[in-house]
Amino acid sequence: MHNDHDRSGSQIGPYELKKLIGRGGMGEVYEAVDTRLGRTIALKVLLPEVVQDLERRTRFEREAKALAALKH
């Protein structure tokens, strides 16, 4: 899945992006390391058009809250 938009190897805040693991209509999902906690996470990077569209951003926030409520 390597292409021109692949941000693997870069850093966003405290998150080091390791590899691109998925791409969809809202953005890209990376395997990343949270450098504050030293643990591997999945990090979704939203497309600019999603961030600028209130309806799509609201849908993303609802999905994120639902996922955060899951316990495993």
Image: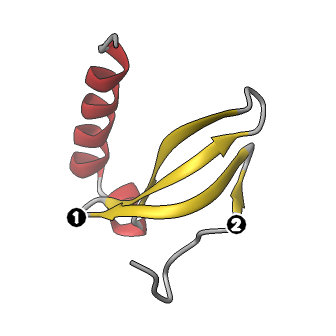
Mark 2, other Cα within 10 Å: few <14 / some 14–19 / many ≥20: few
Q: Secondary structure at mark 1?
A: loop
Furthest residue toward bottom: 4
Residue type at mark 2 is Ser
Q: Which residue is mark 1?
A: 25
Q: Is residue 36 left or right of residue 47?
A: right
Q: Secondary structure at mark 2?
A: loop
Mark 1, other Cα within 10 Å: few <14 / some 14–19 / many ≥20: few
Q: Which residue is mark 2?
A: 10
Q: Is residue 54 left or right of residue 34?
A: left
Comparing 62 with 37, the one in front is 37
The circle on residue 40 is: none
Q: Is residue 14 left or right of residue 50?
A: right
What residue do we see at 65% from left, 43% from top? 33
What residue do we see at 31% from left, 46% from top? 57
Comparing 54 with 7, the one in front is 7
Q: Is residue 14 left or right of residue 60?
A: right
Quarter the C terminus occupies: top left
